[in-house]
Image: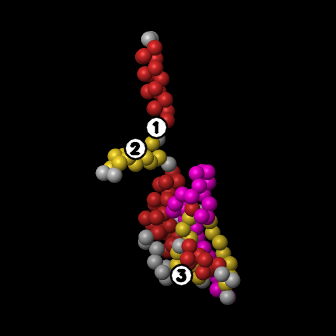
Amino acid sequence: MNKRTLLAATVAMALTVNLSGCIVAVDKGGWDYQTNSDWEKTQEKNRRHLEQVELGMALSQVRTIMGTADFNELHQNDGAQVQVLFYRTHRSHGDGKTSKDECTPIVLTDGIVTGWGDTAYQKAVQL
């Protein structure tokens, strides 16, 4: 094998290894680099399902729509039982672990949805 053929084979192999599992899509605005990973699919699914959650829904309805939460908190606030379910919806850190700041919280008071998102969570945990 001559040097050019060896070099071409090496470059082709390196590109194959580096791009496996990745999708590069061309849109009107340019290139879009995406990886094909479970956490991205989970985030997308959770964002889609979150659109179906409504104020006044019961905990059982939320779990039917959203599935198992990534994190779950429960506490008392002025005699009411406040439960917060956290679902991963975005990425903040590239560490491969899900943290609460990468989740959207759904707040339930006495088993009923009273809000979701950071503002609802901050109001719910004020003691």
Query: Mark 1 and mark 2 in contact (Cβ < 8 Å)?
Result: yes
Circle 3 SS class? strand
Q: Position of residue 49 (x, y in %)?
A: 45, 66
Mark 2 or mark 3: which comes first in sequence? Answer: 2
Question: Per the image, is 89 magenta?
Answer: yes
Count all numbered tags in the image, as a single digit. 3
The residue sitting at 65% across, 72% down in the picture is 73
Q: Quadrant of residue 107?
A: bottom right
Circle 1 SS class? helix
User: For residue 19, which numbered disc appears in the image?
Assistant: 1
Mark 1 or mark 3: which comes first in sequence? Answer: 1
Q: Position of residue 46 (x, y in %)?
A: 48, 63
Q: Residue furthest bottom?
A: 78
Where are the magenta residues, as a range? 79-101
Name the amino acid type tagged 3: Thr
Residue 6 or residue 99, whichever sits in front: 6
Question: Per the image, is 37 magenta?
Answer: no
Q: Nearer the viewer, mark 2 or mark 3?
A: 2
Q: Quadrant of residue 123?
A: bottom right
Q: Alpha-carbon distance for marks 2 and 1?
A: 9 Å
User: For residue 114, which numbered disc appears in the image?
Assistant: 3
- Disc 2 crowd rating (10 Å Cα; few below 14, some 14-19, many 20+) is few
The residue sitting at 64% across, 86% down in the picture is 80
Name the amino acid type tagged 2: Val
The residue sitting at 62% across, 60% down in the picture is 99
Q: Position of residue 51 (x, y in %)?
A: 43, 70
Name the amino acid type tagged 1: Leu
On the rendered structure, is 20 left or right of 86? left
Query: Mark 3 and mark 2 in contact (Cβ < 8 Å)?
Result: no
Q: Which residue is mark 2?
A: 24
